[in-house]
Amino acid sequence: MKRLILNFLLGTAALAALYSCKKDEKYVYQIGEPKIELKSDVSSAHFGDSLVFKLHASDQEIALSTVKVQLFFTDDKVSETIIRTKENGEYSGKILIPFYKNIPNGKATLKFVLQNISQKTTEQAYEIELTRPDFPYLNLVTESKSYKMEKVGPNEYAATESFPFSVKGYIHAPKVGAQGNEMNFGWVNNAVDFGSITEIPFSNSTSGVYSIKFNTLTYAASPFIIAYAINGTVYSRIDDDHFKAELELKNGEKVTIDGIEDLKDWWIDPDYFTQKSDGTINFNGINGKYRVTADFKMKYFVVEAMDGANLATLKADGTGAIWIIGEGIGKPNIAANQVGWNTDKALCLVPIGNKKYQITVKAGESIHKDNINFKFFHQKNWGGEFGATTISTESDLIFIGTGTNGRDSGNLGIVAGKSLTVGESYILTVDLSQGNSKAVLTVVKK
């Protein structure tokens, strides 16, 4: 048995050595005479085409391996097709001519590289004239309908219709020429790009008749007018449903919100704003800088205190901000947007001055009537927090957890046998006037 194993190992080693020699020999001694004969016209094409080619490949001495068809923009290889060539004969295929932005009409190089099994190669290069396709029209495809975009200039297209102020859709280009392909342009990384059908968020300052435009050379598109503003500060886009503005607000000043046509249907946070019967909105917080995020999905404004370029945190002197994280509370309602233990949803209590902070909740809507489990934090994240030794209350409705009374230290709960009255509002105020370690919570029915 040992002899058989030894013979097997020796035989394997010998074969490996022989193969290695042949492999080295194949690399050193390339034989044969591969030849290419192009059978089709490849002198011109459009960007975006699938260019068809035909050729005859042969080698009278040794078997063929592959033919590579490569497209070069100057020295950069931008596309390649590889065909397995088993025997002498005619072969055909396609190579994609990429459609890139800001590439003008011009010349490129199409290279054919034929290789036989000994790795000997031959190549032929051809100059090809590339032009951008002249689309007769484009289509703006939205969820509800398609709008035809007429050609209004070189590479420039526009659809002029009575549009709403916000239009979401992608752009579709028809096939041009026998070798052309249909193309799509959509939203990628906050810009229009080729090959996507993600909706482009066009927006205008008002609804009505206006033009949506697109340039197939530069990918420039319009309009992207952010039609939303608060006190003249234009909102910046976070995503399709969220826009934010950061600005200085003053207590009691009128707040003007522009561009939101259905503002009357939005929930206005009573902590930060007072809305009068005539629709006028005034700010309730102390003077300072705030981030106001417009949530178009839930139709309300998230207001958060700031300190310079960052969200505010509680300072040692009791100024700054207090945040809520936990269960049983949420704005505009707990059914759709409970905070939970997601710090991204932490609620910022409105600073009302004199180191006091408050939040107004409505039982059955923004707070559970009989089951809560949230606490107050020093920041919109984990870190500093108010525990059983740093906050107290004399409320007969809400108690503060100690870790042994049914809630963790500092977590709030509803007193056993009690509940909040559904439909009624309650103001929770945290007073730090005696120091951050002697916070006092009051609960008052509004």
Image: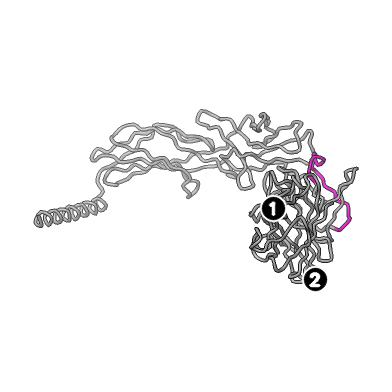
Name the foreground residue: 265 vs 223.
265
Three-letter amino acid code at disc 2?
Gln
Whether residue 405 appears in magenta in the rendering, the answer is no
Residue 112 falls left or right of residue 237: left
- Across and down, in percent, residue 370 comes to 71, 49
Q: As displayed, is residue 175 above or below residue 423?
A: above
- Across and down, in percent, residue 15 comes to 17, 52
Query: Which range of residues does the magenta coloring cover?
Result: 250-267
- Residue named by callout 1: 372
How much space separates mark 1 and mark 2, taking CA atoms?
26 Å
Element assignment for label 1: loop
Task: Determine which quarter of the picture holds residue 69.
Answer: top left
- Residue named by callout 2: 434
Residue 11 falls left or right of residue 279: left
Q: As displayed, is residue 387 above or below residue 21?
A: below
Element assignment for label 2: loop
Query: CB of mark 1 within 8 Å of CB of mark 2?
Result: no
- Across and down, in percent, residue 260 comes to 79, 42
Task: Identify which residue is drawn at 35% across, 40% down.
Answer: 67
